[in-house]
Amino acid sequence: MAVEIERKFLVASEAWRGQSEGKPRVFRQAYLALSERTGVRVRLDETDDAAWLCVKERKIGASRGEFEYPVPLADARAMLKLTTGHVIEKCRFLVPHDGHVWEVDEFEGANVGLVVAEIELKREDEGFSHPAWLGEEVTGEERYYNASLALFPWRDWGKAQK
């Protein structure tokens, strides 16, 4: 099993926009099944017409087990109709900073207005510098996980929750 180690942050300013590289990738993903221990999702990369089925450990923290497999695009589009909750729609921008590449996700649809940045690490204790545009860390806050956003979208949060 592959293990994904990532830290997640809110984005505090628009300054990252001038630093992103390449064209943004457009993703749509839907959760087909969610349990206490796992989530099964299908993700479409609308930019490259590619799709994956992913089984991900549902665990709080920076490290989570993950299995990911390519699937035919037509099958993935059909699976989107089997969703549990809302389809997650987002544009992903790659922003290099001090030897790492940040993935900045600008959400659309039911989560429009939410912008988060993630950094993938090789070790949980790996050091990295924080770009000036980075805001509060939300790595351990389950409500910011995509599976949670599919069930309880950001647009439905009250001011106190944001």
Image (tube, grey):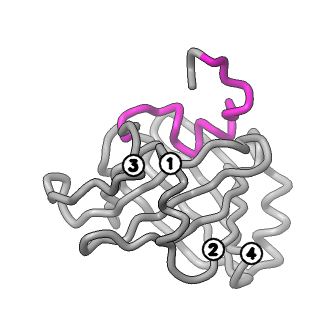
Q: Could you tell which of marks 2 and 1 lies nearer the N-terminus?
A: 1
Q: Could you tell which of marks 3 and 2 lies nearer the N-terminus?
A: 2
Local SS, label 4:
loop
Local SS, label 1:
loop
Q: Amino acid at mark 4?
A: Glu
Question: In the rendering, which numbered label is found on residue 46?
Answer: 4
The residue depicted at 21 percent of the width and 59 percent of the height is: 128
Question: In the rendering, which numbered label is found on residue 134?
Answer: 3
Local SS, label 2:
strand
Nearer to me, 151 or 99: 99
* Image quadrant where residue 34 sits: top right
Nearer to me, 112 or 80: 112
Q: Amino acid at mark 3?
A: Leu
Q: Could you tell which of marks 1 and 4 lies nearer the N-terminus?
A: 1
Closer to the observer: label 1 or label 4?
1
Above-or-below relation of 34 to 104: above
Cα separation between marks 2 and 1? 18 Å
> Where residue 31 sits in the image (x, y, percent)?
67, 49
> Where residue 117 sits in the image (x, y, percent)?
46, 54
Cα separation between marks 1 and 4? 26 Å
Mark 1 lies on residue: 13
Mark 2 lies on residue: 24
Q: Amino acid at mark 2?
A: Pro
Segment tinted magenta in the rendering: 139-159
The residue depicted at 43 percent of the width and 48 percent of the height is: 57
Left-right relation of 133 to 77: left
Q: Could you tell which of marks 3 and 4 lies nearer the N-terminus?
A: 4
* Image quadrant where residue 135 sits: top left
Q: Amino acid at mark 1?
A: Ser
> Where residue 47 sits in the image (x, y, percent)?
71, 79
Closer to the observer: label 1 or label 3?
1
Cα separation between marks 3 and 4? 27 Å
